[in-house]
Image (cartoon, rainbow, N blue to C red):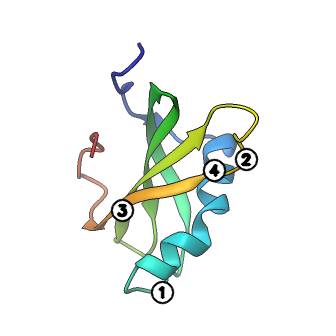
């Protein structure tokens, strides 16, 4: 549905590739060093491109939520970290932010 975020689902290899492309941006914004960097779950929102909302494991019990924007072609390879929420847990619900 255009404009609405999809339900959260388990992360795929494609989503892991998306979060890898913004890893440097994430680490530059974060106050922590990620001992792990693994996408756990995600949802998407179709706008003038795609917003990805991704829960990423960055430590034993430490998670972050990322909002990543992928523009429409021909610029779809220019992923941008829009925003980030730190100090999350596995139980925290992944929501639009």
Q: Which mark's residue is nearer the viewer, 1 or 4?
A: 4
Instruction: Quote the CA–CA distance across marks 2 and 3.
Output: 20 Å
User: Which of disc 3 and disc 1 is earlier in sequence?
Assistant: 1
- Residue 94: give x, y in percent of width and height: 30, 44
- Residue 20: give x, y in percent of width and height: 65, 61
* Mark 1 burial class by Cα count in 10 Å: few <14, some 14-19, many 20+: few
Q: Quadrant of the N terminus?
A: top left
Which residue is outermost to the top? 1
Viewer-proximal residue, 63 or 77? 77
Q: Which mark's residue is nearer the viewer, 1 or 3?
A: 3
Q: Please say if 42 is above or below 81.
A: above
Residue at 48 percent of width and 41 percent of height? 52
SS at mark 1 in the image = loop
SS at mark 2 in the image = loop
Position of residue 45 in the picture relative to residue 85 (left or right): right
User: Which of disc 4 and disc 1 is earlier in sequence?
Assistant: 4
User: Which of disc 3 and disc 2 is earlier in sequence?
Assistant: 2
Instruction: Quote the CA–CA distance across marks 3 and 4.
Output: 14 Å
Q: Please say if 69 is above or below 49.
A: below
Residue, disc 3: 84
Position of residue 33 in the picture relative to residue 24 (left or right): left
Which residue is outermost to the right? 74
Residue, disc 1: 33
User: Which of disc 2 and disc 4 is earlier in sequence?
Assistant: 4
Residue, disc 2: 77
Q: Please say if 33 is above or below 70.
A: below
Residue, disc 4: 18
Position of residue 32 in the picture relative to residue 20 (left or right): left
User: Which of disc 4 and disc 3 is earlier in sequence?
Assistant: 4
The quadrant where residue 42 appears: top left
Q: Please say if 46 is above or below 56.
A: above
SS at mark 3 in the image = strand
């Amino acid at each position: 549905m255009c404009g609405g975020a999809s339900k959260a689902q388990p992360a795929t290899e494609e989503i892991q590739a998306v979060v890898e492309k913004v890893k440097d941006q994430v680490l530059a914004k974060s106050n922590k060093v990620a001992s792990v960097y693994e996408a756990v779950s995600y949802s998407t929102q179709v706008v003038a491109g795609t917003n990805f909302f991704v829960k990423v494991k960055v430590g034993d019990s430490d998670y972050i939520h990322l909002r990543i924007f992928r523009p429409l072609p021909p610029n779809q390879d220019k992923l941008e970290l829009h925003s980030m929420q730190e100090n999350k847990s596995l139980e925290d619900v992944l929501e639009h932010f």
